[in-house]
Amino acid sequence: MDRVSRSEVESAEPIDGVQLALLAAGEHMNIQQFRIEPGAVVPEHSHQNEQLGYLLRGELTFTVKGDEIVVQAGDSYNLQGNEPHAIENTGERVAEGIDIFSPPRTDPDWAE
């Protein structure tokens, strides 16, 4: 077993107001912590990885295929691989949660 302490993992801020940290990674999946400030926008993008997420705090609006889907604290979500999506924190609170990627997304563009 490998243990990853959050205190040993650096966060990146690939977009103003969006902080991401790659945590534990296995052969078939990995986990990422995110923090998105109110008003911050993650532009439309896609990746080969299936993405499962759980929102711990706040509220996010996902745009997928032209539809806006509001995700609130306590909600989980699933984005298929190669499914274009955008995310915006339209709420008044910081949004925090975790994403799980399969296959592992251990070297995303934002980490460079």
Image: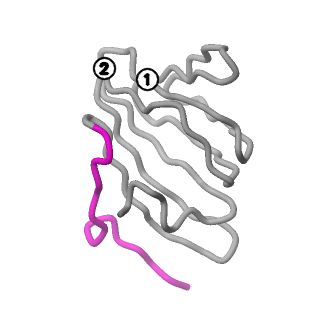
Q: Which residue is mark 2?
A: 39
Type of the residue with mark 1: Glu
- Which of the two discs, 2 and 1, labels the residue nearer the N terminus? 2
Q: Find residue 112 and report its horizontal and vertical position in percent.
A: 35, 63
Q: Which residue is mark 1?
A: 88
Q: Looking at this view, is 48 or 28 the one in front?
A: 48
Which residue lies at the image location 46% right of the left edge and 36% below the top edge?
56
Type of the residue with mark 2: Gly
Which residue lies at the image location 26% right of the left edge and 67% below the top edge?
7
Q: Find residue 79 and report its horizontal and vertical position in percent.
A: 69, 39
Please identify the quadrant where the N terminus is shown.
Answer: bottom right
Which quarter of the picture shows residue 110? bottom left
Tag 2 secondary structure: loop
Q: Is residue 65 left or right of residue 97?
A: right
Badge number at residue 35: none
Q: Is residue 55 above or below residue 7?
A: above
Which residue lies at the image location 37% right of the left edge and 15% below the top edge?
91
Count how many numbered circles sit on residues in the image.
2
Q: Is residue 101 above or below residue 68?
A: below
Which residue range is magenta in the image? 1-15
Tag 1 secondary structure: strand
Q: Find residue 101 and report its horizontal and vertical position in percent.
A: 62, 56
Q: Looking at this view, is 33 or 41 the one in front?
A: 41
